[in-house]
């Protein structure tokens, strides 16, 4: 086994050259080049992350604006609805008022008319009664020669009319 | 060992040979630092790894395939550290990445079929001198981080939460031993896995060659099934190359987690 057989004569050369070449590998490649390679990777990752973050921010901003627009839109819509409701309410109120007034006028006219009708009927009734009483007195005076005073005649007429 | 002509020595692939007449190179203390085939493959690994990562450095916003591949590897290590250590794990990514990719490239390069062109791939991760040093580096990081962050409280790592008082001593002892074994298991696992696979492939290839040399009959019976097995085991070895690199990196991550958070 040359590893052991040649150990005494070669160990120093092996160790020396290993230290030389592994030293070169470590200091030149490991310390010198690897950090740069990793730096490139990091830079790229950072750039990608930044781009993603920017895209996310833009999307958030867009969402925010849409939200704001939506809120404004809703506000406007609500305001419009309120306006319409207000106008509707006012219109309904004024209609009702006018209707009420008209109703009142009509009601008072009806009441007046009914009152005048009732008065007319009462007058007419009185007239009829008076006429009937006079007629009864006349008839009685002519047929029976009996004199009946006005009151008796009237009560008799009333009795007859009520039947 | 490889003197016998026509024989395949399954161990020869692990032989270390100085290249370019560098066997006399020495450091001040008399340490030999010959530029061997092992060092050559470390150099190739480093260069290819550098080229691989460099191809992914275009820093484009929309990555190409190459950049994507490099980024998936760094991302893989990053995720592993994040999952096993947490936020503090990120500062170890350069080390774990270097460790994982260095071992992965070494393992895979050792499997390259460049023997076809008369070259010899050398898997330096099949040497415990190499895996041992890597394991010691990982273990040192654990120790340094542990004592740096927690000071003397780092020793509470050896007493898991809710241990009954009577068992504190034996359990601390067991935990301590298992803690000390970590660098050895880390080093040996990789070294053994890589070596075993390569030896197996070489043994099977010797079956193929010897079978054919013995005549058409044995060639048919021995060589063809052996060759089929070699193909299958080569595929398995590619898997093992990845898994062992991953295991080494993952265990280092777990040990670092212990050092960062205790239990």
Image (tube, rainbow, N blue to C red):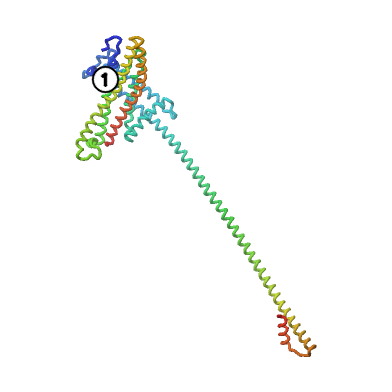
Q: Is residue A159 above or below residue B260?
A: below
Q: Position of residue B36 (x, y in %)?
A: 28, 16
**Between residues A108 and B233, which one lies in front from this camera angle?**
B233
Query: Which residue occupies 62% across, 63% down?
Result: A96
Marked residue chain, label 1: A
Q: Is residue B248 above or below residue A135?
A: above
**Between residues B9 and A36, which one lies in front from this camera angle?**
B9
**Is residue B13 visible in this depiction of the protein?**
yes
Q: Is residue A118 left or right of residue B41?
A: right
Q: Quadrant of residue A137?
A: bottom right
Quadrant (top left, top right, bottom left, bottom right) of the N terminus of chain B: top left
Crowding around mark 1 (Cα neighbors within 10 Å: few <14, some 14 to 19, many 20+) is many
Q: Disc 1 designates what residue?
A: A14
Q: Quadrant of residue A83?
A: bottom right
Q: Position of residue A151 (x, y in %)?
A: 71, 87
Q: Position of residue A71 (x, y in %)?
A: 52, 49
**Is residue B98 visible in this depiction of the protein?**
no
Query: Which residue occupies 22% across, 32% down?
Result: B176
Query: Which residue occupies 48% across, 43% down?
Result: A61
């Amino acid at each position: 086994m040359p590893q052991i057989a040649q150990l005494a004569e070669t160990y120093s050369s092996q160790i020396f050259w290993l230290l030389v070449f592994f030293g070169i590998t470590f200091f030149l490649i490991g310390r010198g080049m690897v950090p740069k390679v990793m730096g490139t990777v990091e830079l790229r990752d950072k750039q990608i992350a930044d781009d993603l973050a920017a895209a996310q921010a833009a999307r958030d901003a867009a969402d925010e604006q849409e939200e704001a627009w939506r809120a404004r839109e809703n506000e406007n819509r609500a305001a419009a609805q309120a306006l319409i409701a207000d106008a509707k309410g006012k219109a309904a109120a004024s209609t009702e008022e006018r209707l009420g007034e008209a109703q009142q006028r009509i009601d008072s006219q009806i009441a007046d008319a009914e009152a005048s009708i009732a008065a007319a009927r009462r007058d007419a009734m009185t007239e009829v009664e008076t006429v009937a009483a006079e007629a009864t007195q006349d008839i009685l005076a002519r047929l029976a020669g009996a004199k009946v005073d006005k009151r008796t005649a009237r009560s008799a007429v009333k009795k007859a009319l009520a039947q | 060992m490889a003197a016998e002509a026509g024989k395949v020595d399954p161990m020869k692939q692990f032989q270390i040979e100085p290249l370019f007449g560098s066997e006399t190179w020495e450091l001040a203390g008399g340490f030999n630092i010959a530029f061997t085939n092992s060092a050559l493959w470390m150099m190739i690994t480093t260069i290819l790894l550098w080229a691989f990562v460099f191809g992914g450095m275009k820093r484009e916003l929309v990555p190409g395939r190459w950049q994507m591949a490099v980024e998936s590897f760094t991302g893989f290590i990053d995720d592993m550290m994040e999952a096993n250590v947490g936020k503090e794990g990120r500062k170890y990514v350069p080390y774990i990445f270097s460790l994982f990719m260095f071992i992965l490239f070494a393992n895979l390069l050792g499997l390259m079929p460049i023997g076809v062109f008369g070259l010899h791939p050398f898997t330096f991760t099949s040497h415990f001198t190499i895996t041992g040093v890597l394991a010691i580096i990982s273990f040192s990081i654990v120790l340094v981080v542990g004592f740096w962050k927690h000071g003397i409280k780092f020793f509470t790592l050896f007493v898991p939460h809710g241990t009954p008082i009577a068992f504190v001593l034996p359990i601390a002892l067991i935990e301590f031993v298992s803690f000390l074994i970590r660098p050895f298991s880390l080093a040996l696992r990789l070294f053994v896995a890589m070596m075993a696979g390569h030896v197996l492939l070489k043994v099977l290839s010797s079956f193929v060659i010897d079978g054919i040399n013995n005549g058409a009959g044995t060639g048919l019976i021995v060589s063809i099934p052996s060759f089929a097995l070699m193909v299958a085991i080569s595929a398995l070895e590619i898997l093992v190359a990845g898994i062992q690199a991953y295991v080494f990196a993952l265990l280092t991550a777990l040990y670092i987690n212990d050092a960062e958070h205790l239990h």
